[in-house]
Image (cartoon, helix red, strand yellow):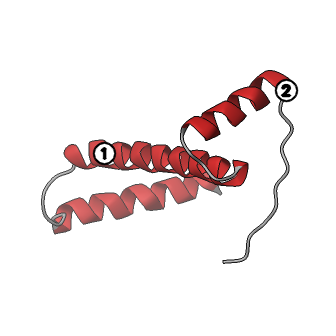
Amino acid sequence: MKAVTINISLNEELADFARSDSKAHAFASMSEYMRDLIRQRRQEQINKDVALLEKAIEGAPLGDPSDEEMAEIYASIKERRKKGK
């Protein structure tokens, strides 16, 4: 995958922290350190999304909806579309 360069500006306090933290965790470069932070942040977001979906699924009924339930769903969609026009 082609690398893209992104420049960031940090105040001195954050820059000092980033330098010392990257050395403490044995990153070979600031780029590796930043990539790791971004991967961690992305994984946190994925975990939140999965938790949200799991919570939504908890209350969902098992199996396929009955013909009557499908008719109600279609009627509801049709009614919302009418209101949207």
Residue in front for this viewpoint, 45 or 34: 34
Which residue type carries mark 2?
Answer: Asn
The reply to whether dot 2 and dot 1 touch (C-beta < 8 Å) is no
Indicate the position of residue 33 as horizontal and vertical percent values: 63, 47
State the residue at coordinates (25%, 50%): 57
Indicate the position of residue 63 as horizontal and vertical percent values: 13, 63
76 sits to left or right of 20? left
Question: Where on the picture, by quarter, is residue 65?
Answer: bottom left
State the residue at coordinates (82%, 61%): 5
37 sits to left or right of 66? right
* Circle nearer the viewer, 2 or 1: 2
Q: Which residue is mark 1?
A: 56
34 sits to left or right of 36? right
Indicate the position of residue 45 as horizontal and vertical percent values: 49, 45
Q: Which residue is mark 2?
A: 11
Indicate the position of residue 16 as horizontal and vertical percent values: 75, 28
